[in-house]
């Protein structure tokens, strides 16, 4: 799965503008994470067509980067994420992003951006 990361101005309407760019390109946002700090906003997206989304975003004057993320299915119970994060951390894998993709049937799916994808895959 591909995650798109970008920095956008921290001002009213930026999320609407970004969502419209993707919507007009026929791209569905499956998951999103966003936060603001120091006058900038940071957005991470999981979409149904990541390369087309990247192209639409870039054509609109934004810059973005992409990364392959590890999708993990966890039991939906307290401490499940802590156990996984501890296992990765103990193995020297740095988790640099996390997006909750949804919870169905007692299991949660999380997209993790990590600094060593192959190592992380071998641990889960």
Image (spheres, rainbow, N blue to C red):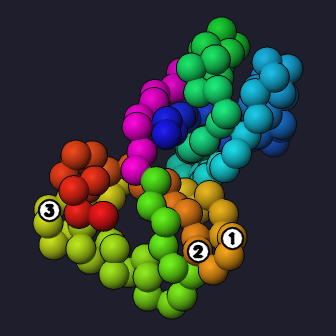
Q: Position of residue 120 (x, y in %)?
A: 25, 56
Residue range in magenta is 63-70
Going from the N terminus, do you reach mark 2 or mark 3 first?
A: 3
At x 43%, y 77%, the residue is 81
- Compare residues 14 and 109 and report the one nearer the observer: 109
Q: Secondary structure at mark 2?
A: strand
Residue that label 2 marks: 107
- Compare residues 52 and 9 and report the one nearer the observer: 52
Q: Is residue 21 above or below residue 55?
A: below
- Compare residues 4 and 72 and report the one nearer the observer: 72
Q: Residue furthest bottom?
A: 78
Residue that label 3 marks: 92
At x 68%, y 76%, the residue is 105
Q: Is residue 88 above or below residue 11?
A: below
Whether tag 1 and tag 2 are in contact, CB under 8 A, the answer is: yes
Residue that label 1 marks: 104
Q: Residues within 10 Å of mark 1 (few under 14, many from 20)?
A: few
At x 46%, y 54%, the residue is 71
Q: Position of residue 83 (x, y in %)?
A: 33, 81
Q: Residues within 10 Å of mark 2 (few under 14, many from 20)?
A: some
Q: CA distance from mark 1 to mark 3?
A: 30 Å
Viewer-nearest of discs 1 and 3: 1
């Amino acid at each position: 799965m591909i995650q798109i990361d970008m920095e956008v101005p921290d001002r009213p309407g930026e999320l609407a503008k970004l969502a419209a760019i993707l919507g007009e390109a026929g791209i569905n946002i499956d998951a999103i994470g966003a936060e603001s700090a120091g006058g900038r906003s940071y957005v991470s997206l999981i979409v149904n067509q990541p390369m087309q989304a990247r192209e639409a975003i870039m054509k609109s004057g934004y810059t973005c980067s992409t990364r392959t993320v590890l999708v993990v299915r966890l039991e939906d119970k307290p401490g499940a994420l802590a156990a996984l994060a501890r296992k990765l951390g103990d193995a020297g894998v740095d988790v640099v992003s996390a997006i909750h993709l949804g919870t169905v049937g007692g299991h949660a799916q999380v997209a993790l951006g990590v600094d060593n994808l192959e190592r992380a895959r071998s641990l889960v």
